Amino acid sequence: MTINVTVWNEYIEEREYPNVRTVYPDGIHEVLAGFLSKEEDLAVTTRTLDMADHGLDEATLDDTDVLVFWNHMAQDAFTDEEVERVRDHVLRGMGLVTLHSAHWSRIMQRLLGTSMTLSWKHDDRERLVCVNRAHPIAAGVPQFVDIDQEELYGEPFDIPKPDDVVFAGWFAGGNLFPSACTWTRGLGRILYFQPGHEEYPTYYIPEIQRIITNGVRWAAPTIRQREPIDCVALERTPEEEYAARHQ
Amino acid sequence: MTINVTVWNEYIEEREYPNVRTVYPDGIHEVLAGFLSKEEDLAVTTRTLDMADHGLDEATLDDTDVLVFWNHMAQDAFTDEEVERVRDHVLRGMGLVTLHSAHWSRIMQRLLGTSMTLSWKHDDRERLVCVNRAHPIAAGVPQFVDIDQEELYGEPFDIPKPDDVVFAGWFAGGNLFPSACTWTRGLGRILYFQPGHEEYPTYYIPEIQRIITNGVRWAAPTIRQREPIDCVALERTPEEEYAARHQ
Amino acid sequence: MTINVTVWNEYIEEREYPNVRTVYPDGIHEVLAGFLSKEEDLAVTTRTLDMADHGLDEATLDDTDVLVFWNHMAQDAFTDEEVERVRDHVLRGMGLVTLHSAHWSRIMQRLLGTSMTLSWKHDDRERLVCVNRAHPIAAGVPQFVDIDQEELYGEPFDIPKPDDVVFAGWFAGGNLFPSACTWTRGLGRILYFQPGHEEYPTYYIPEIQRIITNGVRWAAPTIRQREPIDCVALERTPEEEYAARHQ
Amino acid sequence: MTINVTVWNEYIEEREYPNVRTVYPDGIHEVLAGFLSKEEDLAVTTRTLDMADHGLDEATLDDTDVLVFWNHMAQDAFTDEEVERVRDHVLRGMGLVTLHSAHWSRIMQRLLGTSMTLSWKHDDRERLVCVNRAHPIAAGVPQFVDIDQEELYGEPFDIPKPDDVVFAGWFAGGNLFPSACTWTRGLGRILYFQPGHEEYPTYYIPEIQRIITNGVRWAAPTIRQREPIDCVALERTPEEEYAARHQ
């Protein structure tokens, strides 16, 4: 069964900053889409902020099983309507994989409700440590994944308690972080995955690609509600239903 | 140590509808404040929607350890600023006890992020079943609490996974519900407690009063952050700190 | 990919009691194996208590991806060694689906650590209520599943907090129960599913079959550790590993 | 309200090994009891392995609200009966605070059900990082607590998913660990706290003492069941109870 994956990237820094362009000359989304497209069960398209409706129109989301989302600077660009549209699709079952600084995206702030603040520091060394080996997102990934250069994201990190933390980040600079953590909101599964600062070639690391690929498959919907979300007025008691079935 | 409790009620239906006024002639908030005030460690004040800033001004929240909140119809009355103000205090440690239809309040929608939709039905009989006897909110409460008349709230209920469900509601009309459930958001503890439809004398039941009283004590802050919530830029590595401590 | 399923049944009451034999003339295991065998990805075999090693020998478990387990009276028949053998396979990744009174099996008591006590009552009517629609175990199952006759299992139920409760049981006799709940222990996934008293034709209900089938697929191992479980003495620091990789 | 605390120590290495005796000349239990005794609400006694019934007799446990437990080598000394006795008291409400290598104690293995295996390495530097600032066990403890010398305990650590991880351990040697984690089993609250290798003066560090003191208060029972744990046969339906109350 094919999973429709939409990779969304704000695609600003790769065009503005030479040191980022060097690492991701065609944008982070192209690298993400590149390795995901190699998987037979994934059908991948890309969207960027400079498209109509910022690439987050109703038709796109309606056709998306899992949205992979990289965001950093462009919080003010999003309209309330766009934020609500993405949230609504997640609550009705669309999977969401948010990467690196997208913890701070308006979409994550809206879906999770907390401040999403954290501690941070440039230029550190990270080691991902698997803390949940049986989780599908860890399948085929070694116990430790070393990343020579990353941005430190550390505690305190103001998030709701995750359903699962699959990988934790150990940083040489003396902090640790829930680097791959999951939530369910409505019918939708959400993965946040911390590595992937735009100045470093993190998304070229095979184990990182494996984790993201696993995450996309894990986040694919079990069910997808097409009608609007609403309260339900119940009409019959179980006694009435029982009677109706047995008359 | 005294806990400052603010009981907030929108106080509309008790004035507009005779059948509600009969049950709560001075408003639901006065009944709630009445039994809470009998506890030596609780200092209780009340606020209602018709006050300045809808009773949710900065000074009030700053002096509140736990906000008890009953809300039903007045969603449109709240400004975005008021919603954000309450949310901010919760994230910085203020306890929040939301009652009955306040699951649907803009404040809960903002803090929890999901749609908060549910199934419902008028005029049912409920039995609260304790499903977590060791939880402080269950202290001194029997295994079953029968409520002769309540509004059925049932599944599906679109909430984030609670930290704990302390009581579940069994309804004669064939449904069940996580009737007392808790979350932590930021530094703040949140209890949602379902019984308390305005037409029925639920808040006069001693066991219901006991659960709400327990909930207020449980929700009192461990710490309260007075400065704004913000990200933290780390400056020293642990090696640098270690060297500084040992030089 | 084929999942090897072993259905284990103590197979006592079906032979001893006519009212049970009428419902399950060839044993509960044959009904379970019957509907599971219709699934193309499941390879099903059966084992019963009267076999050598009580049907739980090392070779059987080694070839089993998911063990489906029905147990009621024969607690004293199991040796410590058998209990430890099953536990060890679960901790190394084998899935475990325990049915009805098997909550009380020595294997569940050993794996979960609590007393597994509950309240109970004969002859009741149950309604399964889905409380986690996005969970794979709920796929394709309606919001409510009515069971005309079941044994009431109710609170208090002394279990460790489940990872997820997928279905809760509403009983006409005034109780409720976490009827489908899951845990992860070591690398193994465990589902406990409450319906299935031996006197009633519960396992012939299509929705019950669907839940068990979903549960088997969900419990299939992500990884399976073949070497013994042991502590690991670490030898190199990440600095040493980093140096070794970059020399 | 006074909390009766029993500090149990196997008290072997402090007598056998000079380098341990130098650090804890009167035994680890005396240092633990020393700082706990300074709290007005704690009444502290000590027990050691060399006492009758290994210091874990029925009368002692019956009078204990919270058992603080340090164990390393003496697994074979415990009888099955002693292990079951402690487990039974925890399930009926006694709090349990297990320290350092006591993760491996027979009591923890019995209560939690998993293998409790981990990775380890001598002579490392640890930094405790608070990952749950609102938790009562973190009250008054800074964001980071540096321990100059500790034994590394690292992932994978085979435990059931904790209710809460309050502190995580960052080790210079490239690993991390759920250093303060909690579970509820039956009516009893359990804290496992990792720092405290017998060769290092960890228990003299004020912040470590604060965490253990917080943990003892947190683990004190909400309710304590004095009768044996057993299943409950229900007799009346809620309809019958309702009728009885209203006749």
Image (cartoon, coloured by chain):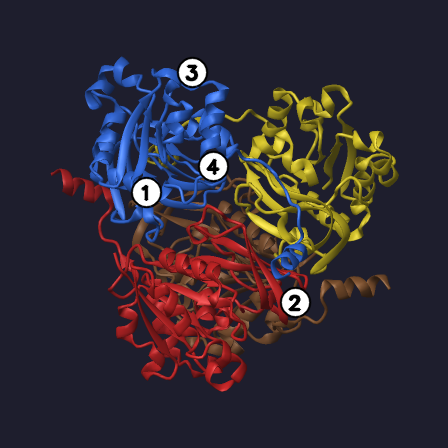
Chain colours: A red, B brown, C blue, D yellow
SS category of the residue bearing label 2: loop
Taking the spot 86% from the left edge, 64% from the top edge, the residue there is B247
Residues at badges 3 and 4 in contact (C-beta under 8 Å)? no
Residues at badges 3 and 1 in contact (C-beta under 8 Å)? no
Mark 2 and mark 1: span between their CA atoms? Answer: 46 Å
Residue D231 shows in this picture: no
Q: Nearer the viewer, residue C175 or B155?
A: B155
Query: At label 1, which amino acid type do we have?
Result: Arg
> Which of label 1 and label 4 is nearer to you?
4
Residues at badges 1 and 4 in contact (C-beta under 8 Å)? no
The residue labelled by disc 4 is: C92
The residue labelled by disc 2 is: B225
Mark 3 and mark 1: span between their CA atoms? Answer: 29 Å
Residue B158 shows in this picture: yes
> Which of label 4 and label 2 is nearer to you?
4
The residue labelled by disc 1 is: C217
